[in-house]
Image (spheres, rainbow, N blue to C red):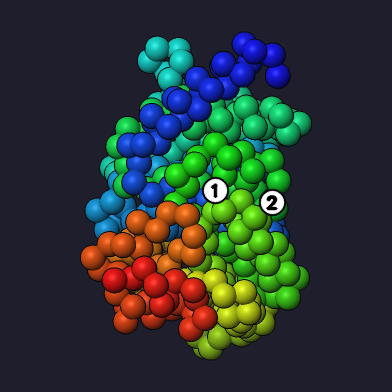
Amino acid sequence: MAEKEIDEYAEQDKRIRERLDKIGRKIMIMSGKGGVGKTTVTVNLANALVDMGCTVGVLDTDLHGPNVAVMFGCKDAELTSEDGHTFIPVSPRKGLKVMSLAFALEDPDAPVIWRGSLKNSAIRQFLSDVDWGELDYLLIDTPPGTGDEQLTICQSIPELTGSIIVTTPQEVAVLDARRSVNFSRKLGVAIIGVIENMSGLICPHCKEEIPIFGKGGGKKMCQDMHVPFLGSIPMEMGLPEAEDEGKEWVDQVGHPSADALKAIANEINNGTACSTSRDTSFMGTPSCKPSACASCTANCPSRNKGHE
Ligand SMILES: Nc1ncnc2c1ncn2[C@@H]1O[C@H](COP(=O)(O)OP(=O)(O)OP(=O)(O)O)[C@@H](O)[C@H]1O
Ligand SMILES: [Mg+2]
């Protein structure tokens, strides 16, 4: 890099730090495999946290398939800026701010064909030039894998609170989730926990659970790899439709998947979810007691230290 570019990069780092300093917890949602429910988890955790009274920002870094805007019901919103440099996030409801490349696309059907370096720049611009203001949480939705997007996030946000890894119980998904665990470890990012999504299908007729992708694979991986398990979310009819229509799901009663998502949001917000490295202040909240750490696996290294 030329000296000028190095200076610009450092200047952007400074802006990123200044903006993100105003945000409490910065959490990356990731998975090794595609289609396991990262965006679903991000959107529903965000809504559940807002329902609890938190202020939440959601950053969509899936530049090739930005779905967050649809699921929040704000797909027609456009990118705005008051000064031509700083972008104003879209606010689909009070307490929630959203930023996605979708707001800048003129044709929603046009493919985004970008090399890694361009993706790196776009994500860094989202971090440095979006006026998030003060927030309790920034949830960062990512595409599948452990590539450019995840690397840029981890390297550009030194105070990243941690990662949440989403998997289904199926062996191939768990295999890929193990890579996400090791990616977080290699980059020194705390693992807040693993979520097993699509954990059994609730039959809409008899309400019995059908283990369509198996069951328990995510939890078992947590035990094997000594990482916290945040909970299981069943597959449920109605959820995809609500997402397509941009309607909140977690405010509906009588849905086991909504209850599971709310319970996970509650656990994260109460500080009972463990993290295993880096930002230990995350688990130092007064409500964080070992006895409350119900979903933490017995082997979680955080279980025996840092909770007091
Ligand atoms: N618990 C669930 N019950 C029913 N449908 C679900 C559930 N979780 C996710 N889905 C559906 O599965 C599909 C994939 O979910 P989603 O888009 O959240 O996955 P993703 O991991 O973000 O995908 P990608 O890797 O493409 O970004 C969507 O149609 C979503 O509505
Ligand atoms: Mg997604």
Q: Does the rendering let one see residue 162?
A: yes
Packing grade of label 1 (10 A; few <14, some 14-19, many >=20) is: many
Residue at x 41% of width, y 77% of height: 304
Tell whether 304 sits left or right of 226.
left
Residue type, label 2: Thr
Q: Earlier in the sequence, mark 1 or mark 2?
A: 1
The residue where tag 2 is placed is 146
Dot 1 beta carbon under 8 Å from ligand 2: yes
Q: Where is residue 201 in the image (x, y as percent from the top left)?
A: 58, 78
Residue at x 45% of width, y 12% of height: 84
Quarter of the image for residue 90 reads top left
In the displayed structure, would residue 249 be above or below residue 71? Answer: below
Q: Position of residue 219 (x, y in %)?
A: 57, 79
The residue where tag 1 is placed is 141
In the displayed structure, would residue 107 be above or below residue 24? Answer: above
Residue type, label 1: Asp
